[in-house]
Image (spheres, rainbow, N blue to C red):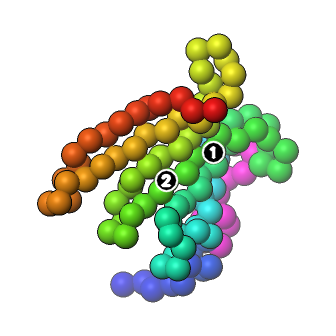
């Protein structure tokens, strides 16, 4: 089993990523620790351009205390082409099973 701390993991991901390719993805683990609540991950995917100056699609996944996804917020466009967030919410029953899954709902 290979053990590494979070900083080492992030550096490995960034070092192995192929830059300037549409679809390049980077994940920010800054708010995914035991001290921040709610914990969330921010993922950015290159839509066009280069890594330093390109256009990105951003998504945030929020987690509860049991590390289950409770909300996903992603960049999107509504039927008129305007930028809006797409929100999906997940609720769990007392056994930990998915009870309701609401979304995707546009929110500006």
The label shown at residue 61 is 2
Is 19 magenta? The answer is yes
**Could you tell me how far apart the alpha carbons at marks 2 and 1 are, in whole angstroms?**
10 Å
Is residue 48 visible to the viewer in this orientation of the structure? yes
Residue 18 placed where, x, y %? 67, 53
Q: Residue at x 39, y 53 (%)?
A: 70
- CB contact under 8 Å: marks 2 and 1: no
Quadrant where the C terminus sits is: top right
From this viewpoint, which residue is outermost toward the left?
95
From this viewpoint, which residue is outermost toward the top?
80
Q: Residues within 10 Å of mark 2 (few under 14, many from 20)?
A: some
Q: Residue at x 62, y 79 (%)?
A: 7
Bounds of the magenta span? 11-21
The label shown at residue 35 is none
Left or right: residue 36 compared with residue 58:
left
Q: Residues within 10 Å of mark 1 (few under 14, many from 20)?
A: some
Q: Residue at x 54, y 84 (%)?
A: 5
Q: Label 1 belongs to which residue?
A: 58
Quadrant where the N terminus sits is: bottom left
Q: Secondary structure at mark 2?
A: strand
Would you place residue 5 above or below residue 30 in this image? below
Where on the picture, by quarter, is residue 16? bottom right
């Amino acid at each position: 089993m290979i053990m590494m701390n979070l900083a080492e993991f992030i550096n490995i991901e960034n070092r192995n990523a192929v830059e300037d390719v549409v679809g390049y993805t980077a994940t920010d683990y800054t708010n995914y620790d035991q001290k921040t609540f709610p914990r969330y991950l921010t993922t950015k995917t290159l839509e066009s351009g280069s890594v330093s100056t390109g256009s990105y699609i951003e998504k945030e996944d929020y987690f509860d205390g049991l590390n289950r996804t409770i909300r996903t917020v992603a960049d999107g466009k509504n039927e008129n082409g305007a930028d809006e967030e797409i929100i999906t919410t997940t609720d769990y029953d007392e056994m930990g099973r998915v009870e309701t899954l609401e979304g995707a709902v546009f929110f500006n």
